[in-house]
Image: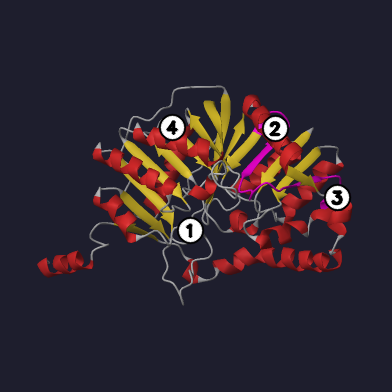
């Protein structure tokens, strides 16, 4: 996907906190769609959220809206056939990124996942963030619902997000090209935005590079809330450098992780970061799934990319980088409230516990994971493909009838 994006001016961004705000906005937008809906997501569950998504999409399909939904073959491997059939029978184009057969009941497509979460409606409104289509992103209803974020954007940036979604489909020959529609390029706000994607072709390091630029330019504050934090050596080094030169560097990481190994890796870095004055807080109210950050008083990012080897070196990811003082202040206020009411501060005493085994773990892990993506790239089994599901492909008898007619 050799699509190069530049900063665009005159955009508008709305921060959406958790699934309750995100789903309400996305579904209302889908219900109002008139021409086109593009969705990329890691997971769709057939639960109350997945059902509401399906009904909104079926309603749009009945209005002759063109719909392309792309899901990940690992994340959405368990979506049932009835759900899929309802979508494809309605004329909805459902694409599965890198589907693989199970081995002894286990999913084998572990790496190079489609991890982006993108929605584009009519080329005029777009959403991007870390929220999948599942009820596990509803902390208002479920005690262990995930804490997460997305943004709703309007303005010229929507064209770039649509182009990125279209490029993925074209690259994997799911479509020849997206049909032209009346996209929106008119200015709607004061925010400058840049879309950065991560793929395994021409954009391997784009998201990481924009993080590095922001960290190096920081002069006063740097606040990161990230679910799976085990950064590259370059990011780790620049965070420590920023703290050494007097920047207030604060991390919010998982205290009640949905995957315990993630906290184990993150905590192996704690003592080293605390030595340089980095403040670390663990969010303990529920699982943290967010990928959000601010630098100084203008820059922010929201997207799907964690700061770990899978996101930075293997997965397909998408982040928006935004220059907007109002959004920056809103994120800062929200994250500060999380620190004050829902986090525990990591002290040197806590970080030093078990350091005798964490130090060698960190050394081995860092050196292994730095080279792991390159090693995985040598395996032809991980060359991604895309399968488009159709009503006929879900019906073996229909396939036989077609071959007989030919």
Cβ atoms under marks 4 and 2 closer than 8 Å? no
Callout 1 crowding tier (Cα within 10 Å): few <14, some 14–19, many ≥20: many
Give the residue at mark 4: 125
Above or below, 83 against 123 in this view is below
Callout 2 crowding tier (Cα within 10 Å): few <14, some 14–19, many ≥20: many
Q: Residue at x 53, y 65 (%)?
A: 110
Question: In whole angstroms, how far apart are the C-alphas of marks 1 and 2?
Answer: 31 Å
Q: With 139 as the anchor, is 165 left or right in this view?
A: left
Give the residue at mark 2: 332
Image coordinates for residue 153, horizontal then vertical, percent: 50, 31
Question: In whole angstroms, how far apart are the C-alphas of marks 2 and 3?
Answer: 22 Å
Question: In whole angstroms, how far apart are the C-alphas of marks 4 and 2?
Answer: 25 Å
Q: Secondary structure at mark 2?
A: helix
Q: In terms of image quadrants, where is residue 261?
A: bottom right
Give the residue at mark 1: 75
Cβ atoms under marks 3 and 4 closer than 8 Å? no
Q: Residue at x 54, y 56 (%)?
A: 315
Above or below, 99 against 24 in this view is below
Q: Who is closer to the viewer here, 10 or 2?
A: 10
Mark nearest the camera among 4 and 2 is 2
Q: Residue at x 42, y 47 (%)?
A: 48
Question: In whole angstroms, how far apart are the C-alphas of marks 1 and 4?
Answer: 25 Å
Mark nearest the camera among 1 and 3 is 3
Mark nearest the camera among 1 and 4 is 1
Question: In whole angstroms, how far apart are the C-alphas of marks 1 and 3?
Answer: 36 Å
Q: Secondary structure at mark 4?
A: strand
């Amino acid at each position: 996907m050799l699509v190069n994006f530049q900063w665009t001016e005159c955009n508008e961004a709305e921060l959406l906190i958790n699934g309750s705000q995100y789903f309400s906005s996305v579904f209302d937008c889908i219900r109002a769609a008139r021409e086109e809906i593009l969705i990329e997501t890691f997971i769709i569950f057939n639960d109350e959220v997945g059902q509401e998504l399906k009904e909104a999409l079926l309603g749009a399909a009945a209005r002759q809206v063109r719909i392309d939904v792309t899901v990940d073959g690992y994340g959405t491997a368990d979506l049932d056939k009835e759900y899929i059939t309802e979508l494809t029978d309605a004329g909805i184009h459902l694409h599965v990124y890198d589907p693989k057969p199970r081995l002894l009941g286990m999913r084998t497509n572990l790496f190079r996942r489609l991890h982006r979460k993108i929605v584009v409606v009519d080329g005029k409104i777009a959403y991007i963030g870390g929220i999948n289509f599942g009820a596990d992103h509803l902390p208002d209803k479920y005690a262990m619902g995930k804490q997460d974020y997305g943004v709703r954007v309007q303005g010229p940036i929507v064209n770039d997000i649509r182009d990125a979604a279209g490029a993925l489909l074209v690259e994997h020959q799911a479509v020849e090209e997206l049909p032209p529609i009346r996209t929106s390029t008119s200015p709607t706000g004061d925010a400058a935005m840049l879309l950065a994607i991560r793929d395994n072709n021409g954009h391997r390091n784009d998201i990481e590079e924009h993080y590095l630029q922001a960290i190096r330019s920081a002069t006063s504050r740097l606040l990161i809330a990230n679910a799976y934090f085990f950064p590259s050596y370059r990011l780790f080094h620049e965070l420590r450098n920023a703290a050494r030169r007097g920047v207030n560097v604060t991390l919010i990481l998982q205290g009640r992780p949905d995957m315990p190994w993630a906290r184990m890796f993150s905590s192996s870095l704690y003592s080293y970061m605390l030595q340089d004055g980095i403040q670390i807080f663990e969010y303990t109210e529920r699982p943290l799934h967010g990928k959000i950050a601010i630098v100084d008083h203008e820059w922010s990012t929201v997207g799907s990319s964690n700061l770990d080897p899978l996101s930075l070196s293997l997965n397909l990811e998408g982040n928006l980088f935004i220059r907007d003082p109002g959004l920056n202040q809103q994120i800062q206020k929200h994250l500060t409230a999380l620190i004050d009411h829902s986090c525990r501060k990591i002290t040197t005493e806590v970080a030093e516990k078990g350091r005798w085994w964490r130090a060698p773990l960190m050394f081995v892990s860092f050196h292994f994971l730095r080279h792991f993506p390159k090693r995985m790239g040598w395996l032809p089994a991980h060359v991604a493909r895309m399968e488009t599901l159709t009503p006929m492909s879900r019906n073996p008898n229909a396939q036989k009838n077609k071959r007989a007619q030919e």
